[in-house]
Image (tube, rainbow, N blue to C red):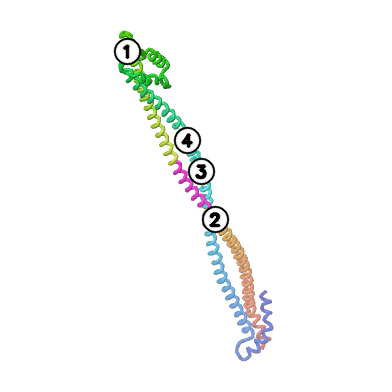
Amino acid sequence: GALLVASGYAASVDLSVKSGVGSGVTPVQKVIQLMEGMLAKGKQEKHDEQVQFAAYKQFCDDTATEKKRDIAEEEDQIEVLKADIEKDTATAAKLTKQIAQHDEDIAVWKGDQKAATNVRELEKADYDAMHKDYSESIEALNGAIAVLKKQAYDRPQASLMQVSALNSLALIPDSVKRTIDAFLQADPAESLGVTAPEAHGYEFQSQGVIEMLEKLLDKFIAERTDLEKTEMNSKHAFDMLMQDLTAQIEQATQDREEKAELKAKTLQAKADALGDLEDTTTTRDADQKYLDDLTATCEQKATDFESRQQLRAEEIEAIEKAIEIISSSSVKGHAETYLP
């Protein structure tokens, strides 16, 4: 290779001879100067290319490092977003079940309120009817007793209608009604010719009826009092039940509203995370493609650089060999002999 390089300059020797006449520079020296100039230029170009490639390689390394860091951060972000989405999905599903349970509880409690109200209305209607019967019976008994306590000859015949009216009351026992009928049929006021003993006997019978009615009156008063207490207790129990059910419904409604709001926020957060995941994945893929393309380009340029550096090294080595050959004593001697 060096011989070819040396012979390549043979054509320039003549020119060198002509231009070198009278200058004190021999043709061989002129060739050596030209070749040394080429050598220096080759080395400089090789060095310049090394500097240029070093800068490019630094760009490749820095950019690749930056992209790898970005991709790693994006991968971490993707994992976080996937975890958030999974968590939000589970939370929303759990809240959906809890909301459904609240809806079911509220429906059941409202049903209990309606059923309890229906029962209460029936109880109140029964109470009102029974209380009315007791009150009417007590009032009638008081009136009948007042009439009977008057002397037989002191009370008008019409006043016995109050006693007779007891037979129309539902609460009056049949045995009492029969006694009243028997008593009324024996009323001496219907005949003015009764003797004193007969009147005395009637008054004795009247006292027995009074005692019977007074016992019945006491019984009715006591039963009405018990009925009122029972009604009061029933109403209190109903009020307490309704208060408890209302409190449970209000609390469940509040809990449901809070969970429905939390579910809406959770689903919105999930939607946002899905959007971020899509964007981050797109960015990651773009960065990865850029990194792959950059790596391929940098590797190709590195291969090209190595090839050019090898070629320049071979050229420089060939020039150096040529200079060495031309500078040898045999070549110099030969030139001095044949060249002017």
Position of the C terminus by quadrant? bottom right
Cα separation between marks 2 and 3: 23 Å
Residue at left offset 38%, top offset 20% = 161
Labels 3, 4: front one: 4
Local secondary structure at mark 1: helix
Magenta stretch bounds: 252-271
The image shows residue 323 at horizontal and vertical percentages of 62, 78
Farthest residue, direction front: 193
Labels 4, 2: front one: 4
- Pointer 3 residue: 94
- Pointer 2 residue: 275
Q: How crowded is mark 3: few (under 14 residues within 10 Å), some or many (20 or more)?
A: some
Q: Residues within 10 Å of mark 4 (few under 14, many from 20)?
A: few
Q: How crowded is mark 2: few (under 14 residues within 10 Å), some or many (20 or more)?
A: few
Tell whether label 3 touches label 1 (CB within 8 Å). no
- Pointer 4 residue: 114
Labels 1, 3: front one: 1
